[in-house]
Amino acid sequence: MYTIEIEAVTEFTPEVLELIQTTYSIIPEFEQGYASQEIAQRLLAGPALLLIARVEGEIAGFKLGYQTDDQVFYSWLGGVAPDFRGLGLAKSLLEYQERWATEQGYQRIEVKTRNCFPAMLKMLISSQYQITAMINDAQNHSQNKLHLQKQF
């Protein structure tokens, strides 16, 4: 059995923003990453939450989101490093984020994913998220962007 810890951060100091970049870089699906400036701009605009999952003390994954209006929390970025997949970390991070969002008074969580991430889509649907829109990529259907939300 592994020791798994989830750390929640709501204050975004320069050190935390650097931690986000480090954590973000361990997820291979994010090869086209966001610049530090864009991450900071989104997180410093209002309430936000960073969750860091550690396995035996090693960073294994993360989930990052922020408020888009008084009632909506947007689950923006997240992932689990390949060496730590299959341990239930993504589900644990999702459930933690949902608990936190409801405690903060949000009425729903919104999230976007793509067809090329079927494990994420399956996890969201099994957690009662509903597809609310799709942006079609006529060139490559695996890049269709799916919008989902969960009401509380």
Image: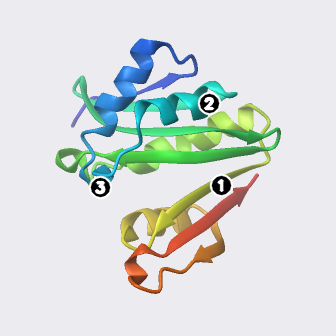
Residue 53, placed above or below residue 83? above
Q: CA distance from mark 1 to mark 3?
A: 20 Å
Q: Is residue 122 visible?
A: yes
- Residue drawn at point x = 42 percent, y = 30 percent: 36
Residue type of the residue flagged with mark 1: Glu
Q: Is residue 67 left or right of residue 59?
A: right
Q: Give neighbour class at mark 3: few <14, some 14-19, many 20+ (Cα, 10 Å).
A: some
Q: CA distance from mark 2 to mark 3?
A: 23 Å
Tag 1 secondary structure: strand
Q: Is residue 129 visible?
A: no
Nearer the N terminus, badge 2 or badge 3? 3
Nearer the N terminus, badge 2 or badge 1? 2
- Identify the residue under disc 1: 110
Tag 2 secondary structure: strand
- Residue drawn at point x = 27 percent, y = 39 percent: 25
- Residue 122, image x and y in percent? 45, 69
Residue 101, placed above or below residue 109? above
- Identify the residue under disc 3: 29
Q: Give neighbour class at mark 1: few <14, some 14-19, many 20+ (Cα, 10 Å).
A: many
Nearer the N terminus, badge 1 or badge 3? 3
- Residue drawn at point x = 57 percent, y = 16 percent: 11
Front position in the image: 45 or 93 = 45
